[in-house]
Image (cartoon, helix red, strand yellow):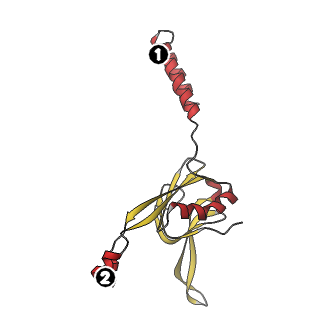
Amino acid sequence: MPDEPRFRRSTYLGGLPSAPDAIHTKELVFGEQSIHFDYFESAWVEGYGEQRVRRQIEVCATSDIGSIEVTSEQVAKSRVRFALAFGILGAAGAKATQDRATVIVHTKAGELGYLVIDRQAQPEVQAALAPWLRSHGIALGAPQVNSASALSIADELKKLGELRDAGLLTDEEFAAQKGKLLNS
């Protein structure tokens, strides 16, 4: 199995009913069993005192993923930090934009989950995810829609409308046939 791809400065924006509403944390992990966020918190451990304990928040089970789509954009970056640290000249020399990748998880049930990874561009994220996707048999990109079936249903509806307009079908027969086509 390939290493688990990990991305720092990540945010889950929502979309999947099984996951929490939104999560902003330090590390997004594409693991063996799930996509999840790792974080550490302080906890009292009997006999050891206060310890840092690793926690996970699951976003989606790996077995539920149909495909993953990755997009990228440039976003404006605040230069206030550079101005405070290095003065006006530091702010003037600071990069004004940063990369932001969006990972869209398409589940087999047709649901969408949105993850944002700051300071990463699409090619970097795709390269990091490629071995993991291959090992789990998950497609990269949006799921393919069968346009031929949608076109044939539209053609059938058009033909039914023509038959109704010609008086060969009653409105009830037209509605019944239309319902069968749309529910198939």
Q: Secondary structure at mark 2?
A: helix
Amino acid type for the residue under numbered disc 2: Leu
Q: Is residue 78 left or right of residue 4?
A: left
Residue 131: which quarter of the image? bottom right
Q: Is residue 21 left or right of residue 143?
A: left
The total of numbered circles placed on residues is 2
Above or below 177: residue 170: above
Along the viewing direction, whichever of 83 and 36 lies nearer the viewer: 83
Q: Position of residue 75 (x, y in %)?
A: 39, 63
Q: CA distance from mark 1 to mark 2?
A: 73 Å
Name of the residue lying farthest toward the left: 88
Which one is in front, 8 or 166? 8
Q: Which residue is mark 1?
A: 171
Which of the numbered marks, if any, corresponds to residue 120? none
- Measured along the vertical axis of the image, is residue 70 above or below residue 11? above
Give above or below for 35 relative to 52.
above
Quadrant of image for the C terminus: top right
Q: Mark 1 falls on what kind of element?
A: helix
Q: Residue at x 47, y 9 (%)?
A: 167
Relative to 94, residue 175 above or below: above
Q: Earlier in the sequence, mark 1 or mark 2?
A: 2
Q: Residue furthest top?
A: 167
Residue at image location 63% in from the left, 60% down from the top: 130
At 56% from the left edge and 27% from the top edge, which residue is drawn? 152
The N terminus, quarter of image? bottom right
Outermost residue to the right: 1
The amino acid type found where label 1 is placed reads Asp
Tell me the mark number nearer the camera, choosing from 1 and 2. Answer: 2
Tell me: 3 left or right of 120: right
Circle 2 residues within 10 Å: few <14, some 14–19, many ≥20: few
Tell me the quarter of the picture where residue 153 sits.
top right
Q: Position of residue 70 (x, y in %)?
A: 53, 56
